[in-house]
Amino acid sequence: MRRPAHLRLVPVAAATWSAGAVAILTPAAAPAIAAGLWIVALTAVGMTAASRRRSRVVPVIVALALAGAAVAASHVALTAPVRGAAAGFAIEAGRVIDVEATVIGKVERRAGGSLAFDARATRITAGSRALEAAVDIVVRVDPADIERGGAVDVGAVIVARGTAAEARPGERAAFVLWASRGVEVVGPPAGAMAVAADLRHGLVAAVAGLPGEGAGLVPGLAVGDTSAVSPDLDVAMKQSSLSHLTAVSGANCALVVGIAFAVTAALGGSRGARVIVGLAVLGGFVLLVTPEPSVVRAAGMASIAMLAVLLGRTGAGLAMLALAVAVLLALDPWLSASLGFALSVVATASLLLLARPLAEGLGRAMPRPLALSLSIPLAAQLACGPLLVLIDPRVPLYGVAANLLAGPAAPVATVVGLAACLAAPLPLLQAGLAGLAWLPASWIAATATTVTALPAGMVPWFEGWAGALALTAVGAAVAVAIAVRRGPGRARLLLRGTSLALVATVTGVALGGGALSTVAGRWTLPADWSILACDIGQGDAVLLRSAGSVALVDTGPDPAALSACLARAGIDRIDLLALTHFDLDHSGGIAAVVGRVGTVIHGPPDDDGRVAIASLVAAGAHSVEASAGVSGSLGEARWRVLWPAAGSRAFAPGNDASVVLDVRGGGIPAILLLGDLSASPQRVLEASGALVPPYAVVKVAHHGSGDQDAGLYASAAPSLALITVGAGNDYGHPRDTILAVLEDLGAQVTRTDLHGIVTVAESAAGLRVWREREDRVGGRR
């Protein structure tokens, strides 16, 4: 009867999670939802108190579930007026605003090269008006626009200047601030926050001189600081299912608390002393690594676990997890929409419920130690896979094997790396410990890169919720097939047979669909395309083809996504690679084409750009820095660079120095590719007389941002406007302003976020446009 007892709090967590999710998605209805739940909860409490039944377990659980749900909804209802007022003031201002805020989340680099961090706003100023409001926001900023660059850290006080945009439904942030006018640090972190920041930065500096990818991985494994992890290793860690090792969560908290318990016990401390020391150490650890959702969940779980130790009731893992989830969601309902929080909870639950049955099942076919080692990553992958395909509809084929190889090294790197972090006052000791942590970290990095390089490492899967449900079914069937004991029983044979048949059927369909979207995909595309826009998310990757020669304009943010597009189009060799500039959403996929490029033309390079170009040249490419007037041929077509002006230094490397190309002839309809040019250089380009209109196709600048010059598009007179943009992107691209400009010009608009891959061919009757899918909004073609 122990297991049912441990399941009793699961409905409480589920109800709190559901109510929190509904409330944050419909904040206007949160007061009514909260009031209704409180009425029902109090009624349930009264009925339970008046009941004469001997067992009141079920009524108590129902009452607790309703109370948890009511608390979560009430939290949203109480904060909704302030959040709504702040968002309305910031967005309706319609101009640049100043926001005074304190940084509360670590700074992370996004695919487009911008930085993002969570902050707690205290004052919002728009012209002569000001609003005092304590709300959470997200700040997005270009690294070059941060004054006193490295000082933005958790606890820093800043003033951010820019324009506000709506946050996505369900986000904790009241609004998103695009700090186009910069971020000024007016006060560095203070007190404990300053100490924690110095320790993290000290660890990053201590490993900076160590060789290889493992050096940058040490801070990530020890304290969750991934700032030194290279983009290539970051991709490899994700594709090999090892990225969880740098997301500080339950394993790290367990190690820290376990060490604290062991040391206190060795010093003769009582059970209560061990718990007190463990809680203190855990609090310091959370402060050191910053309170990310997974860390908060893990810390809550560990705190409740220590309470169970103090009370002498250990082992009720699932009950402790459910209680931790319910408490955390009641205190912070916005966690209910956090995928990181969901993954953390699901992974923990899978280890509690699945690991032992899987180990027992695997133990019937292999040595028990190997079965135990294999059961943990297998349980986590089976449980987390359905959530991960919502982000990336691909399944890592070698994820379990990678975790099996890297798993033993992770605790060593974490503990030694954390010791190196805390040894900052003793530089010599810190350097020695950092060197020791580098060894297991390098093993993990080598595992990730080796596994990623294996063929068919990422298996394409169904997209969206259909894919998540399909993978859930496959995971359940795999678990049943392994865990159900073998024997002559008819029911067992039927259950195992059904599970194996389900796995074979769903996997076969998925692999078949994956083949059609990659290696066999060329059969699903028009054979005569001359322009093909890849659907690679928020970024640019446009193929041009003439007489068998192929050009690629930018590579998008992700090598895997670009590789899939090239495979589907049947492209093995890139005769001409044009890198308009070196933001990650335009150059992050370079690894997919290294060794396959003949000539690369590029805009003014920054430091990252020089490294990227060097890698292409080392693999056999010829490099040319592009400027206005540079031209060449592609098969029977001609290409010409219109921007940037030769010798001009008016615009620094980046968006406004993007290479602008005019390509036409040889079967390619006249196309103008505008990179990420903003309105100011667009006006200069239009005035230069370099355009040769009309253009059949214009690749709209900067994914359809609002910073555009209508005059340039009027001069280009496009028949077709191609917008390369990611679905549900955080930037609000494409903006209504540029869509209105294109509509007024009578241009047909096609978008990769709505239409997927887009191809264009030239015929005697005009342009022939093919779209992979119909418009998701309105069903337009």
Image: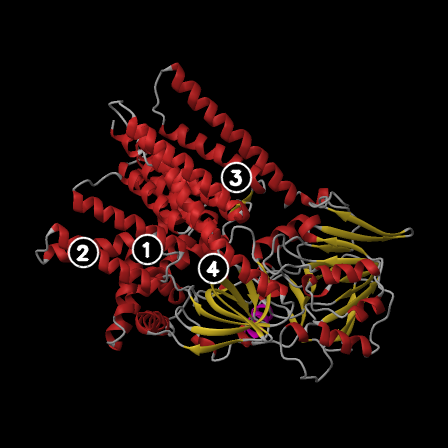
Q: Residues within 10 Å of mark 4 (few under 14, many from 20)?
A: some
Q: Quadrant of the C terminus?
A: top right
Q: Residues within 10 Å of mark 2 (few under 14, many from 20)?
A: some
Residue 617: within the magenta? yes
- On screen, residue 354 versus residue 746, left or right, reads left
Q: From the top left corner, tell me how far across and down residue 137 is, in percent.
A: 50, 62
Mark 2 residue element: helix
Residue in the image at 71% along x and 48% along y: 755
* Cβ–Cβ under 8 Å for marks 1 and 4: no
Q: From the top left corner, tell me how far across and down residue 475 is, in percent.
A: 45, 35
Mark 3 residue element: helix
- Give me the disc on residue 410: 1
> What amino acid does circle 2 point to?
Ile
Image: magenta residue range: 608-618
What whole-number distance in Å separates the C-alpha atoms at marks 3 and 1?
29 Å
- Give me the disc on residue 690: none
Residue 404: within the magenta? no
Q: Nearer the viewer, mark 3 or mark 1?
A: 3
- Give me the disc on residue 468: 3
Query: What residue did someone put label 4 on?
Result: 234
Q: Nearer the viewer, mark 2 or mark 4?
A: 2
* Cβ–Cβ under 8 Å for marks 3 and 2: no
